[in-house]
Image (tube, rainbow, N blue to C red):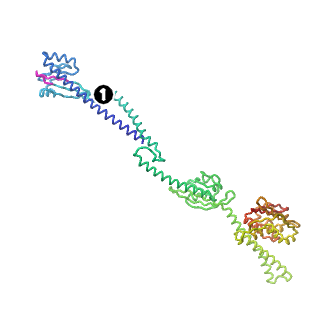
Amino acid sequence: MRRRIFQSIFLACFITLVLTTACVTGVIYHDSTQEIKKEVMNQTLYISTAIELSDDGIKYISTVGKESDNRITLISSDGTVIYDNYVLAETLENHYNRPEIQDAVTYGKGELTRLSETLGEKTYYYAIYLNNGMILRVACTIKSVIGLMNSAFFWVVLIALIVLFISVLIARIITNSIVKPINNLNLNNPLLNNTYEELSPLLTKIEKQNQKIKSQFDELSARQKEFDYITESMNEGLIIFSENGTVLSANKSAKKILGDITGKSYLQICRDMNYIKAIESARNGKPSVSKTNINGKVYQLSANPVENNLKSYAAVLFIIDITDKEQIEKMRHEFSANVSHELKTPLTSILGYAEIIEKGIAKKEDIPRFATQIHTEAARLLTLIDDIIRLSRLDEGNLNQEITEIELSQLCKSVINELLENAKNKNVKVSFEGVPVVISGYRSVLHEMVYNLCDNAIKYNNENGSVVVKLIDENNKIKLSVSDTGIGIAPEHHERIFERFYRVDKSHSKDTGGTGLGLSIVKHAALLHDAKISLESQPGIGTTITIIFNK
């Protein structure tokens, strides 16, 4: 814009300069020519009057011709040149047929202007008819416009250059003065500008556009904040890849799983083949779901393509932690297998003994022993089924009970009394230490928890051993611990001891009649009451299991 304005102003100045020069030159040339003609006419009249009054006209005209710059010629009535102050009269041809001479003879005076193209000059002739029959002609050489320009070429060029330079400065100043208000426009607040009225419609449109853009930007910002809030609050990882596989965006969960991945290529993030195949499948336009292990956890990867206008695909990856789900699934399979095995074992014994009795193979003296064995296995089977039902109820939280205030010390003493007979059979001493405390919970669940802890402490104790049940109330925590002086548990079994059907020594557990579900029931009962459970045990020394309740 600045260039166009400058060029327009400069061109206008240049054209004005040319036209002004031409017009001024023409006017000056016309006026000077008229002055010269008038001077020639006057000189001709003066000389003609002097010749007519003089006794010797030739002598007078010779005197005047020597001092005059104009050409003076005296011609006879037949056209013969009598006198010429520029050249010898004898050398000149007859002038009778000259137009200005013809006009002078006919009309008393005549004039003519002849141009010399080669010299760039023209000559003005003025002739007058004298009373004595002769013709007096005075001529003056006048430069043509071209000749005039040629003679003043240096000054014309110099003045033109000066004027052009001034024109450039003026054009630049005017251009700056025109453009400056436009360059200083406040486009953020167009209506506050004090500038050209012609720009008002444009500024009004800009103001409307600004309002529209602001409204759209505010809406986009609100959506972006909402999107960021949602994605940052997600437990699932969310990663957005560009069409070339570079990470455009990643939420907090994704960074927690994979580290700082912003701006990195998908190949730099993880080298797991399932992950790479999922991303490449999405980049090829096909959704993909797979699993991968990252830092010891199992994640489900859900990659989906996002098509853009270039017919290439970006990708969106969801990372879902399914470690617990996988573990639960694994535990479910193990539980199903263990239940089948645990149920099958006593049933096999029952069916075997019953079949022997049914077919009369058994001796009469063996029938009571077989019946006792059938009763024992049936009781063991019933206990196992009861434990499975209890555990299932704890898993589902379907207890059909209300939370009540329970005095825990009394519950512990009640359990100890129930197990006194079992303790006497093992020569194990069971004691209680602690103060009365009250907690909110499910009475039957807490009873099962304490019962299983004490029952295990008696079953897996040594002869003449001891079991101590402690109840401590301190620092807004209630600690229930059951300690024994039994066989203990090796460190490699500590993490799995609360799993269902897990036994440290299966043969020994079978002898004691354990189902392998007791500590699982304890663990679920603790979780149901938002309590923490800890284990301390050393082989040959004993075991202490502590349940910590929040008040």
Quadrant of the rendering where the C terminus is positioned: bottom right
Q: Where does the image place residue 203, in percent across and percent down from the top left?
A: 44, 48
Examine the rendered structure and indicate whether residue 134 appears above or below residue 375: above
Queried whether the magenta region covers residue 500, the answer comes back as: no
Residue 467: x and y, percent?
A: 85, 65
Is there any visible trace of residue 225 in the rendered image? Answer: yes
In the image, residue 346 above or below residue 528: below
81, 74: nearer the viewer: 74
Magenta segment: 128-139
Position of residue 19 in the picture relative to residue 66 (left or right): right
Question: In the rendered image, which quarter is residue 457 located in?
Answer: bottom right
Q: The N terminus is located in which quarter?
A: top left
**Image coordinates for residue 126, horizontal then vertical, percent:** 18, 25
In the picture, residue 481 is in which quadrant?
bottom right
Query: Is 134 part of what is drawn in magenta?
Result: yes
Please tell me how crowded label 1 is: few (under 14), some (14-19), or many (20+) other residues with Cα within 10 Å. Answer: few
Task: Give the residue displayed 39% in from the left and 35% down from the top.
Answer: 170
Looking at the rendered structure, the secondary structure element under dot 1 is: helix
Q: Which residue is mark 1?
A: 150
Looking at the image, which residue is at 62% across and 59% down?
A: 234
Q: Amino acid at mark 1?
A: Asn
Q: Is residue 506 left or right of residue 328?
A: right
Q: Position of residue 440 (x, y in %)?
A: 74, 66
Q: Is residue 493 visible?
A: no
